[in-house]
Image (cartoon, helix red, strand yellow):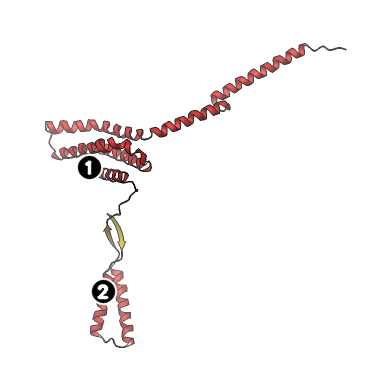
Amino acid sequence: MKKIVKKSAIPLYVVALTWVLYGLLFPLYRLPHFLLAIAATAVVGVIARCFCGNVEVEVPEEPVTTGNAELDKMLAEGKAAIEEMKVLDAAIDDEGISGQIVRLQILAQRIFDHVEANPEKLRDIRRFMNYYLPTTLKVLRSYDVLEEQQVEGENITSTMKRVENMMSTIIRAFEKQLDNLFSAEALDISTDMVVMEQMLAREGITEDGLKEAVREAESSAAAVETATQVSAGEITLEL
C-alpha cells in the first residue's frame, strides 16, 4: 500500500448544501439572485477549504513487472522475505540475533538486486530461494516463538542456543551465495588483467617489464662501449 495526498471532498458537499439552503430561503429567478448565491457559495467554499485540509489515502501499489515471470516471482518472494525479516528483527529481543538479521537483510537485498540486473543468473539462486531462504525464515520464526515463552526449560534453552550458534553459518551461506554470483565477472576481469599485463610487459611498462628493459638497455650500452674500445685500439695516430 502507498499513501497519496488528496484534497478533502467536504468543501464540495458544503458548497452543494449552501446552494440548496439558499434556494430554499431566497428567490433564484433573477440574475442578481444567482450572483449573490455564487458569491455566498464561494465564501462558504473558501472557509470550508481552510478548515478541511488535505487527507492521506492509502491505495494499492501497482505491481512492478520486468516482463520476466520467473524474475517477477523471485523479486516478489525476495521482497516478502526481507519484510518478514524486518518484522522478526523488531520482535526478537536478543540484540545479537537482531544484528545478524539486519546483516541477512542486507545480503539478501544485494543478491536480489544483482539477479534483477542480471536475469540470466536466476538459475544460480534456485537452491538459495528454495531452501536456504525459507529455512532461515523458519528458524528465525521458531526462535521468536521460543523467546516469547520466557522459560529456561531444557528444550527451549538448548534450541535457542543452537539457533544462536547457527546464525554465523547462515550468514556465511548468504555471503557465499552473493560471492558466487560474481564468479563470471571475476573470471572475465582476471582474463582481461592477464592480457593487459602481458601487453604492458612487452611494452616495458610493468615493473618486471621495466626491469627487463633496463637490463636490455644496460646490455646494449655495454656492447656499444666494448665495440668503441675495440675500434679505438685499432686507430693509429701519425704525426
Residue 31 in the image: x percent, y percent?
Answer: 33, 87
Read off the residue under disc 2. Answer: 14
Q: Quadrant of the C terminus?
A: top right
C-alpha separation, residue under disc 1 versus residue under disc 2: 47 Å
Instruction: Left or right? Give the position of 19 relative to 185.
Output: left
User: Between 64 and 91, which is closer to the camera in this rendering?
Assistant: 64
Disc 2 is placed on an element classified as helix
Image point 21% across, 43% down: which residue?
A: 91
Q: Measured from the top left, where is residue 177 in percent x and y? A: 32, 34
| Above or below for 187 versus 36 | above
Residue found at the far right of this picture: 239
Residue at the far bottom: name it. Answer: 30
Q: Amino acid under label 2?
A: Val
Residue 5 vs 232, above or below: the answer is: below
The residue pinned by badge 1 equals: 88
- The local secondary structure at tag 1 comes to helix
